[in-house]
Image: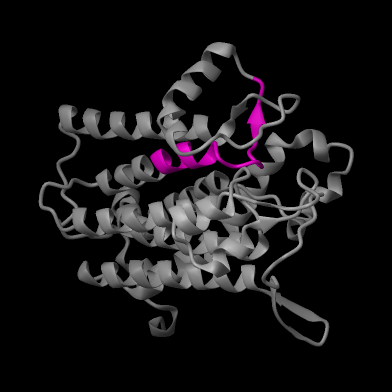
Amino acid sequence: MTMYTLAIDSTAFQIGSLTVQWYGIILGFAALVGLLIAIQEGKRFGMASEFFMDLLLFGAPSAIIAARIYYVAFKWDDYKHNFWDVFKIWEGGIAIYGAIIGAFICGMIYSRYKGYSFLRIVDICVPGLLAGQMIGRWGNFMNQEAFGGPTTEAFLSNTLHLPSFIVDQMFIIDSAFPEGAFRHPAFLYESVWSLVGIVILLVLRRRSFLRTGELMATYFIWYSIGRFFIEALRTDSLAFMGPKWLVSIMDALWSPMTLMFTQGYLDPAYGNIRISQVVALLLIVGAIIFVVVRRVKGFANTRYLDPIVTSKPERNVPLSDKK
């Protein structure tokens, strides 16, 4: 296990034997912000806030479980002889794409149960989801994780003009650099990319040309473009051994980044292709096909701004109002 010396204490406070980590506080705040954004937009369509609260109640654990399953599946060699370690999620090891899969499956089931179109609901939720991801990345900052390869203090301070508290936190001591080295703040790059994406989604959802499902597609395209380029900076990527032609494609697509960055180290004994990059490309292509096919085939006949109705209104009555 990699050991870190933190410039900022990752523990927020202690109450007796209970230790509260900044990571947990930040994730909780991220979920709250995402929820509030969804509730506010839902009100424009006459949807009860309880719907989104319940969706988060079911969706959060679903996302965590799926994120863990995703991570363990690609790191099975590390767990197959220590099965109980699979459940030690507090030791780290979750994957954001797994979390998205879990949240979407839960959202699909819950939306159908409530009688709503899943695409209508996910369109409402994706700006809040991206906001949660943006804030959640600062949990990685507090834990000194999800960082990139080595860089210089001058690059962080003078080129990127980052404040000292970020620069200091990016000086990381681990097995690769026992004496310590400054690292690329990959968490920050993704957080800023997500912030720009939120603005794009908020602007798009007020446009009359937007059809159902297309805000979701935009989310996948935008997030995955950023994730493709940022993932290659990291030194902790899940990976697999793939054909040389696929490696060449990945390197060629990433080549514009070489003007300012170098890829983070990826142990060739572990893999030569980063899984998140492959998933990102598949999502980009899939989202584009989704939009084009629905438009061409005439399936995109509902606009984002159209009213949202449910086929099961009785299931949207708050529990306190039921007799």
Which residue does the image show at 16% across and 27% down from the upper left? 296
Which residue does the image show at 76% across and 24% down from the upper left? 269
Residue 275 position, x and y percent, is 58, 32
Residue 183 position, x and y percent, is 61, 50
Which residue does the image show at 71% across and 41% down from the upper left? 72
Residue with the most extreme right position: 81
Please tell me whether residue 209 is drawn above or below residue 169 in the rendered image. above
Please tell me whether residue 318 is drawn above or below residue 88 in the rendered image. below
Please name whichever residue, 305 or 155, is drawn nearer the observer in this view of the structure.
Answer: 155
**Bounds of the magenta segment:** 224-241
Quarter of the figure with residue 50: bottom left
Please name whichever residue, 191 or 303, is drawn nearer the observer in this view of the structure.
Answer: 191
Q: Is residue 131 left or right of residue 244?
A: left
**Quadrant where the C terminus lies?**
bottom left
Residue 314 position, x and y percent, is 34, 69
Residue 27 visible in this rendered orientation of the protein: no
Please name whichever residue, 181 or 25, is drawn nearer the observer in this view of the structure.
Answer: 181
Quarter of the figure with residue 80: top right
Please tell me whether residue 78 is drawn above or below residue 255 in the rendered image. below
Residue 229 position, x and y percent, is 46, 37
Please name whichever residue, 192 or 222, is drawn nearer the observer in this view of the structure.
Answer: 192
Residue 226 visible in this rendered orientation of the protein: yes
Which residue does the image show at 43% across and 30% down from the upper left? 281
Scheme of colours in the image = one colour
Q: Is residue 22 left or right of residue 292?
A: right
